[in-house]
Image (cartoon, rainbow, N blue to C red):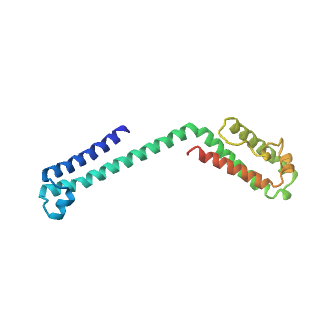
Amino acid sequence: MRRYSAVICCLFLLSLIVLAGFAQATGRSITCAIHTGELGGYDVVAIIALFPAFASAFAAWKSYRITEQSQQFQKKLAKNQNYLNKMTSILTKMESLKSLLNNIHKISDGEFNSLEPLYIDIKSELQALATSKIMKENPSSFFIASSLGEALFKATNFRDEINLEICQIERDFNEIFT
């Protein structure tokens, strides 16, 4: 990484040396010489050579910045891969629970009871993330209840509660990479 910045500095200094050499040799600035037509063949070549030098210096600097950003992203990804997988799993389970509860009045008691393990699983994974301090806020009141029946009884609008929790997890997920 440090080599790129050294290359950029060298190319920039080389360009300045060429400009200074031209100004010292002619006793005039480049713009003055251009206007009066006093530029020789070598002078034009020297001036034209500055443009690729500046372009390559800029390209090297951009390459360095992109490489640095990519490396930082990869470090964050590797460091938090386990948490990201857990968050993705929780989000998938929450979306599944939300879609199954959309028709809560039409499902049988047996189907409702089969949702209890999914609710308990989501609740335990949310608590694990909250204790690991990956999540910025504690789970919503919907996921603090001891059972799905209790959570639905206490919730005024369970869809909003689930959506609120989904938004919070997505925010925490995105915050890992900022």
Residue drawn at (30%, 53%) of the image: 55
In the drawing, does residue 98 fall left or right of residue 52?
right
Quadrant that contains the C terminus: top right
Tell me the residue at 78%/44% (across/down).
143
Q: In this view, does 116 lie to the left or right of 134?
A: right
Does 145 appear above or below 102? above
Q: Position of residue 173 (x, y in %)?
A: 62, 46
Identify whether 157 is placed above or below 135: below
Residue 86 pos. (x, y %): 65, 41
**Residue at 67% from the left image edge and 47% from the top image edge:** 169
In this rendering, position of residue 22 left or right of residue 55: left
Number of residue marks:
0
Residue 177 point in image, percent of width and height: 56, 45
Residue 150 % position (x, y) = 86, 46
- Quarter of the image that includes the N terminus: top left
Where 156 sits versus 117, above or below?
Answer: below
Q: Is residue 132 above or below residue 91?
A: above
Toward which corner of the image does residue 3 lie, by quadrant?
top left
The front one of 38 and 95 is 38
Q: Which residue is drawn at 20% across and 48% down?
A: 20
Between 135 and 30, which is closer to the camera in this rendering? 30
Q: Answer left or right for 66 relative to 97.
A: left
